[in-house]
Image (spheres, rainbow, N blue to C red):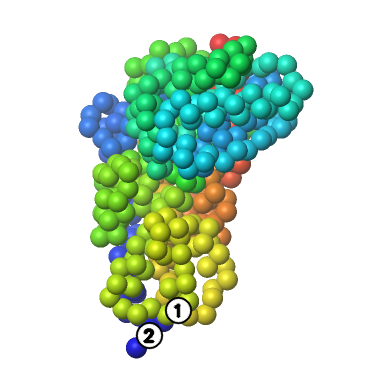
Amino acid sequence: MIMAIDKSLRDSAQLFILELNDLRQLVKRFRNEIEAGLHGRESSLKMLPAYVGRPTGEEKGAFIVLDMGGTHVRVMSVRLMGDRNAAIEDIVRHPIPPRLRRGNGESLFDYLAQAVRAFFSSHDIPPRPLAFTFSYPVAQYSLSSGILIRWTKGFTVSGVEGQDVGALLVTALKRAGCADLPFMTLINDTVGTLLAASYRDSTCDMAVILGTGTNACYPERAELLSCPGPFPQGEVIVNLEWGGFSALRRNAYDRLLDRQSPNPGEQRMEKMVSGLYLGELVRLVLCDLMRREKLSPSVTALPLTKPYALTSKHLARLITTCPPGMEDVIELIHHVVTRSARIIASGIIAVVTHQDPTLQNSHTVAVDGALFTGYPGYQDKLEATIAALLPAEKARITLIPEREGSGVGAAVAAAIALYR
Ligand code: GLC
């Protein structure tokens, strides 16, 4: 008998449910790991100082930003007006070809440098200070240097882990004939998002990325961190690298995805939450059931044979169009995506209550990434979870979308570096 999917799929979908009590525990574990990481004790949160604090909003200047994310490289010219206003004057996007994600460092950095060079060739602008956003875990030792700890988000490029990515870029820029660009700053995309949002709005005190990967940062009191300033406002932004958070209960599909990934054991939270992995989790459940049962043709017509062929974009399309015969698959997608939003909501509450335990003040959280801005209903799920966990204080936490913040924020970092 052909099943339009049945009890076993519903049973598998249940494996993705996290109840409010689980989430309360999760918030506590998150806060413990934040404290442990900050004080140098063992923690799955790296708590990396970014060597920069929040801006005053008066920073000015024109900059070129190179922003390398999980799927695209963007080059943009950004102007900061000095009155909390910033403008992207121009932006060019290049996809990162799959061969470069698995190749060698020189080819990847040459591709980045060529993107910068092409930007100058096609735009009639004089050389400007260059700011670099690199969306991978980097242990910084200044605002312009830091070593890549490990690749994440499926990258396996050789010769970059353990190297200073700022220096690799400078060398590649020389090879590309762009030696005249003063290289200013190296930042993470979360840090960029916080800098961009707080340039405009001084109440912003956390940033979250929810795209191919996931991560967050917030401003911490500088005296807690051993990192030389000066930090005029006494604070330094800390990159949690929360994709690595590991105090989470995983099910059989989470473990399978992890085992088959290029970095088993790492980025446990990211693999349960972010855009790169949600489709793959759904695919693994469906493939498992297909081995045991005959599923309806509408289900088997999905791209299930190749790993990672079912993407978050497919999931978004399915839940919007609700094709007949797919009701149980849609229920599965609902549970997988809701779990993602619930884990993220718990992380946000942990970071905000770490800063303000009794939630005396209002907090603005800037969020960027295609899962947040592009997946229908994701923001609602996130806000509903925050409201369920903090019924009395929910109005103290406001989520704001911050598009292209990772790029604009790099310019803000460069302006801070120039004038300090
Ligand atoms: C991954 C990277 C992290 C980045 C995040 C979002 O988790 O390790 O540095 O911020 O993806 O792009």
Q: In the picture provided, is 16 more to the left or to the right than 229? A: left
Q: Position of residue 367 (x, y in %)?
A: 53, 43
Determine which quarter of the picture holds residue 202.
Answer: top right
Residue that protrudes farthest toward the bottom in the picture: 1
Q: In the picture provided, is 201 more to the left or to the right than 187? A: right
Local packing at callout 2 (Cα closer than 10 Å; few below 14, some 14-19, many 20+) is: few
Instruction: Report the residue at 34% width, 88% height from top.
Output: 1
For mark 2, give the secondary structure.
loop
In whole angstroms, how far apart are the C-alphas of marks 2 and 1?
Answer: 9 Å
Instruction: Report the residue at 44% width, 74% height from top.
Output: 299
Closer-to-camera residue (164/418): 164
Determine which quarter of the picture holds residue 364.
Answer: top right
Mark 2 sits on what residue?
2
Instruction: Report the residue at 42% width, 35% height from top.
Output: 103
Q: Position of residue 96 (x, y in %)?
A: 53, 39
Instruction: Report the residue at 46% width, 51% height from top.
Output: 275
Q: Amino acid at mark 2?
A: Ile
Q: Position of residue 236 (x, y in %)?
A: 44, 23
Q: Upstream in the sequence, badge 2 or badge 1? A: 2
Q: How many marks?
A: 2
| Above-or-below relation of 233 to 407 | above
Q: Amino acid at mark 1?
A: Pro
Closer-to-camera residue (314/373): 314
Mark 1 sits on what residue?
297
Q: In the picture provided, is 221 more to the left or to the right than 315? A: left
Q: Is residue 289 visible?
A: yes
| Above-or-below relation of 375 to 78 | below
